[in-house]
Amino acid sequence: MPRLDRVIETAVYVDDLRRAAAFYEDVLDLPAMVSDGRFRAYDIGGESVFLVFQRGATLEEVKLPGGTIPPHDGHGPLHLAFGIDADELPKWEARLAEKGVPIEARTDWPKGGKSIYFRDPDNHLLELVTRGTWKIY
């Protein structure tokens, strides 16, 4: 059986790409790697790509010089977790408070990890999580 190595990309779909980009770039300090009217791509720790798509803007096939990207889209609030170092958690709590982003919940995990949860402008549930949460993290 061939083995999957890791998740390279994950995506959310938003109603207002400019508003979402302002949130992710200002609050989480994510620099856009690539962007156009359909999406923004963000580097997460040099390991994965976080894609923010304008809802409805990817319903047609995209033709590229090397191939095509099939249509896709999504609706409803999604959940996404970003890994952080444990010593960064208080700094993130302060950053979110400074930016007026309420923390919706906190969780202390049995293996010692900690999570905080908050929402982006499109109601996606974002989590900042430290090691000690999953068997692999």
Image (spheres, rainbow, N blue to C red):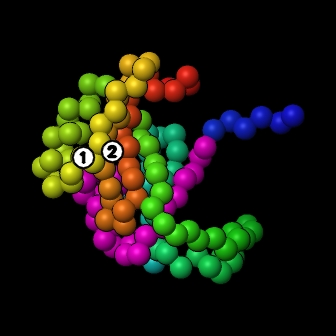
> Quadrant location of the N terminus?
top right
| 41 and 86: which is toward the camera | 86
Q: Tell me what residue is drawn at x 42 percent, y 20 percent.
A: 110
Rendered location of residue 71, percent (x, y):
67, 74
Element under disc 1: loop
**For residue 6, side relative to residue 33 (left or right):** right
Q: Quadrant of residue 85?
A: top left
Numbered mark located on residue 117 in the image:
2
Q: Which residue is mark 1?
A: 103
Q: Is residue 14 visible?
A: yes
Residue at figure coordinates x 34%, y 33% from the top left = 107
As drawn, 71 above or below 50? below
Most distant residue in the top direction: 111
Mark 2: amino acid: Tyr
Mark 2 and mark 1 residues within 8 Å of each other at the beta carbon: yes
Left or right? Give the position of 45 relative to 11. Answer: left
In this view of the protein, which residue sits in the foreground, 9 or 78? 78
Nearer-N-terminus badge (2/1): 1
Instruction: Judge from the rendering whether residue 96 lies leftward or rightward of residue 117; answer left or right.
Output: left
Picture quarter containing residue 114? Answer: top left
In the rendered view, would you say 61 is above or below 40? below
Magenta residues, start to end: 7-31
